[in-house]
Amino acid sequence: MGLLLVRSMSRVFLIVVLSCSLAAAGEPKVRAPVSAYDVHRICELIAKSSGAVVKTIEPFLSEDYVAGVTPQEVMRVSETGKIKYVLWYPRRDRVYARTTCKRCTAPGYVYQLQKARGEWQLLRRDRLVD
């Protein structure tokens, strides 16, 4: 009886581990300041439009102040060679999503998306090059 319990527990443990690893494998790496719900909506929108799988969601940076986000210091070099450090803010309503092709070895696309009136919209799609 004790051996049967151990075997059944090991099966349950194996199923839980496999399902967690499969779920984690499907999630994109997110660096943009967006919610889990927004990540889901972005992935869903891109999958419906192209069938592609989102690998990363990156922030769209702007010089305009955005409350509640951590700015990134960026080096700007002028035409005269003068270096100036400026703060850029990741926007919550605009992101880049990088995809890979499901059925091929092509490098995929970069999508620019914007959230307007609570819904994400595709603004632009550019093919990645090797």
Image: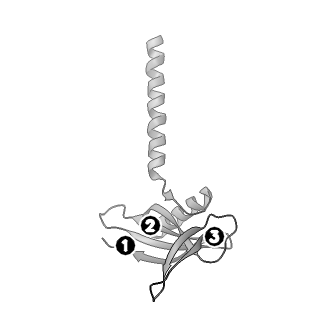
Q: Are marks 2 and 1 in contact (CB under 8 Å)?
A: yes
For disc 3, the marked residue is: 119
Mark toward the viewer: 3 or 1? 1
The three-letter code of the residue at mark 3 reads Glu
Check disc 3: other Cα within 10 Å, few if <14, some if 14-19, many if 20+. few
For disc 2, the marked residue is: 98
| Residue drawn at (56%, 59%) of the image | 40
Q: Nearer the viewer, residue 80 or 16?
A: 80
SS at mark 1 in the image: loop
Q: What is the residue that sits farthest to the top in this orientation? A: 1
Tell me if 64 is positioned left or right of 61 in this view: right
**Number of marks in picture:** 3
For disc 1, the marked residue is: 128
Q: What is the residue that sits farthest to the bottom in this orientation? A: 80
**Rendering coords of residue 120 (x, y %):** 59, 70
**Rendering coords of residue 58 (x, y %):** 51, 66
Up the image or down, 107 lies above or below 29; here it is below
| Residue drawn at (64%, 64%) of the image | 69
Earlier in the chain: of badge 3 and badge 1, it is 3
Tell me if 18 is positioned left or right of 118 in this view: left
SS at mark 2 in the image: strand
**Rendering coords of residue 16 (x, y %):** 49, 35
Image-quadrant location for residue 80: bottom left
Earlier in the chain: of badge 2 and badge 1, it is 2
Q: Nearer the viewer, residue 86 or 37?
A: 86
SS at mark 3 in the image: strand
Report, in whole angstroms, how far the alpha carbon at label 2 lies from the one at label 1.
9 Å
**Quadrant where the C terminus lies?**
bottom left
Q: Are marks 2 and 3 in contact (CB under 8 Å)?
A: no
**Rendering coords of residue 118 (x, y %):** 67, 69
The three-letter code of the residue at mark 1 reads Leu
Up the image or down, 12 lies above or below 75; here it is above
